[in-house]
Image: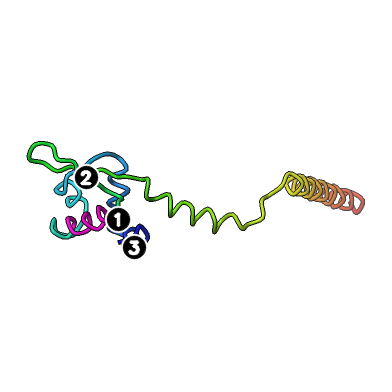
Amino acid sequence: MDVFGAIADPIRRDLLRRLSGGPARVVDLAADHAVSRPAISKHLRILVDAGLVRAEVSGRERHYVIDVEPLGEVRDLLGALTARRAPISTQHLDALDTEVHRAARDRRRGASASTHSKEDIA
């Protein structure tokens, strides 16, 4: 399975989030989910096949560890999709700053004009 197919499932994405904090055993990962240990093992196999997770044997225990390198393909796609947006330039930010100051000035002038007109009536 490819990386995109592997991360398509919300449980597998959650397993990756959990493994990003450090190695874990199947029993530890299953405790965080409302699915069985065999189901978690199946999800882990898919992640292993995609190269996103590897199993490290320590004595009688198997610890699963994340490998983020294959996520580079996802990162590249997201970068390409988001790079098409026009960057916000300094000129745009300066224009926004000018408009904010102009609006504040106009508000102050409007408030002082209404105060003067009320004083003129009284």
Task: Kindly identify which numbered label has been placed on residue 50.
Answer: 1
Residue extent of the magenta highlight: 40-50
> Which residue is painted at 36% across and 45% down in the image?
68
Total tally of numbered discs in the picture: 3
Q: Is residue 60 left or right of residue 120?
A: left
N-terminal of the pair, mark 1 or mark 2, is 1
Q: Secondary structure at mark 1?
A: loop
Marks 3/1: CA–CA distance? 8 Å
According to the image, label 3 marks what residue?
A: 5
Image spot of residue 109 (x, y percent): 85, 48
Question: Marks 1 and 3: in contact by CB < 8 Å?
Answer: yes
Q: Is residue 96 left or right of residue 36?
A: right
| Residue type, mark 3 in image | Gly
Q: Is residue 91 left or right of residue 6?
A: right
Question: Marks 3 and 2: in contact by CB < 8 Å?
Answer: no
Image spot of residue 89 (x, y percent): 71, 47
| Residue type, mark 2 in image | Tyr
Image spot of residue 73 (x, y percent): 43, 53
Q: Does the magenta-highlighted stretch encompass residue 56?
A: no
Q: Residue furthest top?
A: 59
| Residue type, mark 1 in image | Ala
Query: Mark 1, residues whose alpha carbon is within 10 Å: few (<14), some, or many (≥20)?
Result: some
Q: How is the image coloured?
A: rainbow
N-terminal of the pair, mark 2 or mark 3, is 3
Task: Kindly identify which numbered label has been placed on residue 64.
Answer: 2
Marks 1/2: CA–CA distance? 14 Å
Query: Mark 2, residues whose alpha carbon is within 10 Å: few (<14), some, or many (≥20)?
Result: many
